[in-house]
Amino acid sequence: MADFKDVNGDSIPEFLGADWTFAYWKTSFAESPAPSIILRFNDGKFRLASDLMKENPPNKNELDSLSEVIRSNSSWGTSDYFGDIYYPSILWAKMLDLIYSGNETLAWYFFDDSWPSSIPGKNKF
């Protein structure tokens, strides 16, 4: 899903879409995160408009609740048909949303808080 909309009120529409860079990364396509992006036409190309993507950080209690849900996911560390280790895709989907909205420090806090201490591979992930 994509659209053109004048996000910043300058009478020039920006492109609103999704970043599919992480499609199939450690998960099926159905669970692949695709964070929202805004692109601005500049110097003959569409370029990331990170200033228009900034958002206030989410409520810490909501983030902590989501971390708890992720930590308690019973599929952590199991292997799929191909022998790949399962990690809940909601983990990096939320991290990407935080990073893309200008909240990178909070994304790393969320990652640390969400990863169960009993599951190996955190540094490699």
Image (spheres, rainbow, N blue to C red):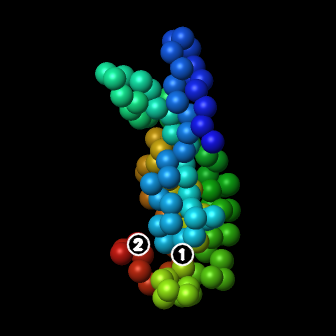
Verify CB contact (< 8 Å) between mark 1 and mark 2: yes
Mark positioned earlier in the residue sequence (1 or 2): 1
Q: Position of residue 49 (x, y in %)?
A: 43, 31
- Residue 14 appears in the figure: yes
At 61% from the left edge and 52% from the top edge, which residue is drawn?
60
Q: Establish if 103 lies above or below 115.
A: above
In the picture, the disc for residue 18 is: none
Q: Position of residue 36 (x, y in %)?
A: 56, 43
Q: Establish if 51 lies above or below 22.
A: above
Seen from this angle, which residue lies furthest left?
43
Foreground residue, 105 or 9?
9
Q: What residue is disc 1 on?
A: 87
Mark 2 residue crowding within 10 angstroms, few (<14) / some (14–19) / many (20+): few
SS for callout 1: loop
SS for callout 2: loop
Q: What residue is disc 2 on?
A: 125
Q: Position of residue 10 (x, y in %)?
A: 51, 12
Position of residue 59 in the picture relative to residue 16 (left or right): right
